[in-house]
Amino acid sequence: MDTDVIATLTALGYSIVEAQAALQSIPRDAPDDIEERVRLALEYFA
């Protein structure tokens, strides 16, 4: 699932390092829904 989040973020133009940092910012209790996890990861860049 996290690989899908990283793939989505890199497809949006973020580097793999940026995508991994954003992924680490997602709370541990975040839902397993990929769209929600991508949204939470994008908040890292805001």
Image (tube, grey):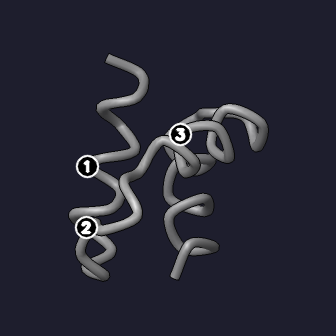
| Circle 1 residues within 10 Å: few <14, some 14–19, many ≥20 | few
In 3D space, how far apart are the residues under numbered discs 1 and 2 (Cα atoms)?
Answer: 6 Å
Where, by quadrant of the figure, is residue 7 drawn?
bottom right
Which comes sooner in the sequence, label 3 or label 2?
3
> Where residue 11 sits in the image (x, y, percent)?
57, 50
Q: Type of residue at label 3? A: Ala
Question: Is mark 3 in CB contact (under 8 Å) with mark 2?
Answer: no
Question: Is mark 1 in CB contact (under 8 Å) with mark 3?
Answer: no
Q: Which mark is residue 35?
A: 2
Q: Residue furthest front?
A: 29
Q: Type of residue at label 2? A: Glu
> Where residue 17 sits in the image (x, y, percent)?
77, 36
Under tag 3, what secondary structure?
helix
Q: From the image, tell me which residue sits under label 1.
A: 39
Question: Is mark 1 in CB contact (under 8 Å) with mark 2?
Answer: yes
In 3D space, how far apart are the residues under numbered discs 3 and 2 (Cα atoms)?
Answer: 14 Å
Residue plotted at (33% across, 74% down): 34
Q: Type of residue at label 1? A: Arg
Residue plotted at (30% across, 68% down): 29
Q: Is 25 positioned to the left or the right of 18 in the image?
A: left
Q: Which mark is residue 7?
A: none
